[in-house]
Image (cartoon, coloured by chain):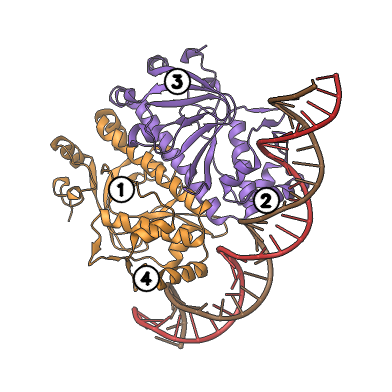
Chain colours: A orange, B purple, C red, D brown
Amino acid sequence: MPFACHDCPLRRLDVFEEFSEDEVRFMEGFKAGELEVGPGTPILVEGARSPQLFTVLSGLGLRYKTLEDGRRQVINFVMPGDFLGLQAAVGGEMGHSVEAATDMRLCVFRRSDIWTLFKNHPDRAYDVTWIAATEEHFLGESLASIGQRSAIERIAWGLVQIWTRAGDLDLLKNDTLLFPFRQQDLADTLGLSLVHTNKTLAKLKERGLVAWTDRRLRVLDVEALERMALMDRSEIHRKRPLM
Amino acid sequence: MPFACHDCPLRRLDVFEEFSEDEVRFMEGFKAGELEVGPGTPILVEGARSPQLFTVLSGLGLRYKTLEDGRRQVINFVMPGDFLGLQAAVGGEMGHSVEAATDMRLCVFRRSDIWTLFKNHPDRAYDVTWIAATEEHFLGESLASIGQRSAIERIAWGLVQIWTRAGDLDLLKNDTLLFPFRQQDLADTLGLSLVHTNKTLAKLKERGLVAWTDRRLRVLDVEALERMALMDRSEIHRKRPLM
DNA sequence: GCAATCCACAATAAACTGCGACATAGAGGC
DNA sequence: GCCTCTATGTCGCAGTTTATTGTGGATTGC
């Protein structure tokens, strides 16, 4: 059963900015309901207008685009706290699809309410923009990875990316992440073939940097992977707004 | 010398939404000045905080990221009407750099004024978000191209992209675009080597689909290129806001 | 005025290789 | 016993790397 924003478990995480009492109250009005879906459920569909926006409360999913001939590009992995459907809300149509990979719990907002948010809650509107701009930032990183990095660098990069996000969200139990995705999903994220992803992954496993079997992912040496992927250690973990 | 927003030549273009009298007045207050820069001038720098935001009035440029070892990923080509620096304005730091490729004229806004925009002009705040969400949309397209398309498909895709944008902005004179970029820039956009870009481009020229010499670009058969790149003909040209 | 010298870019060639395509096998899971 | 996913091996090619050459523009020198 739905809970009040006041009790939202996400709010407690360090990654997210604190809410003022006023904001909590507003969000409780803004929240239109909750939605639970199972693995494989399409949440938003590329090219469609959606009357709803979502914040992920729990569970994992995928954002992806497909070309006409079936090739698929995974945009990124969807994790708790992610805000879904903004493109459709302001632009008109979604540029990609979103699909659940596990059971997911979503907080639902009405597209039609978005305007009142801008009108009456400039601070929250600002946060929405913040989120959009930050997402743009990450897509730029992805572009650079896919465009410039070699297969092994890309995989290292991708794993670090997933691992740090999961860490921020307190998703690591026993230093292990329950990771419902297939190698094919990672391959489609990084623009690599499945086979080559598998083989490259094997190298990282041999070197003892990663362990990934049976839907359980462990990154054993983050720094080695970061070095391998030429990543900026400097990426500061800033708090981010939660819708 | 600077002109008032009322006389802004961009506003007249069909691609941009009409301004209400009220909006024009507000923008004239929001506008902090104008800036003219020459080719090669860095406008925004990755990782830096910029106290300013810009709208491109004229001229072309590049957005790009660089890895530590010098590899460069061009995020996209900057054209008139583009809004620059939002990431730094709301997030804190730029995720990429922006550099002029020709003489450019920029409309300058103060970062510190952005908040009053959200506070007092929800419609304009909404537009800012619209722009951010749309940019995210385009980056998703780029990801799919670089991740999934073959070299020739990518180049076809890239050229169509440039060509349509330029067309919308009325940049085509005699069906020709003055295009200040080098093949290297296109290569870095598409994640290809310079040599392979050159060869693949040559194929498109042979087939009579494109002509590009001496900084003049002509796309002779857009539809053939679109087909080759498996592009959605459906991408509707919607009006977009101008900041 | 016109060589002489750079320099930035395009063009093309030749050799190498990272990654994809295809094939097959094994390991759960329903 | 089928289906999905991981694992590995072999082979070939798309795309990279490393040249070399040509061209027009800009700068210098006399």
Which one is in front in this view, the residue at disc 1 or the one at disc 2? 2
Whether C29 is drawn above or below A17: the answer is below
The residue type indicated by label 4 comes to Gly
Instruction: State which chain disc 2 sits on.
Output: B
Residue A207 appears in which quarter of the rendering? bottom left
Residue A224 appears in which quarter of the rendering? bottom left
Which one is in front in this view, the residue at disc 2 or the one at disc 4? 4
Q: Are marks 1 and 2 in contact (CB under 8 Å)?
A: no
* Secondary structure found at label 4: loop
- Earlier sequence position, callout 1 versus callout 4: 1
Does the image show residue B101?
yes
Residue A230 screen position, x and y as percent: 44, 53
The residue type indicated by label 2 comes to Val
Residue at position x 63%, y 53% from top? B151
Q: Name the residue under label 4.
A: A208
Q: Name the residue under label 1.
A: A54
* Secondary structure found at label 1: strand
Q: Name the residue under label 2.
A: B195
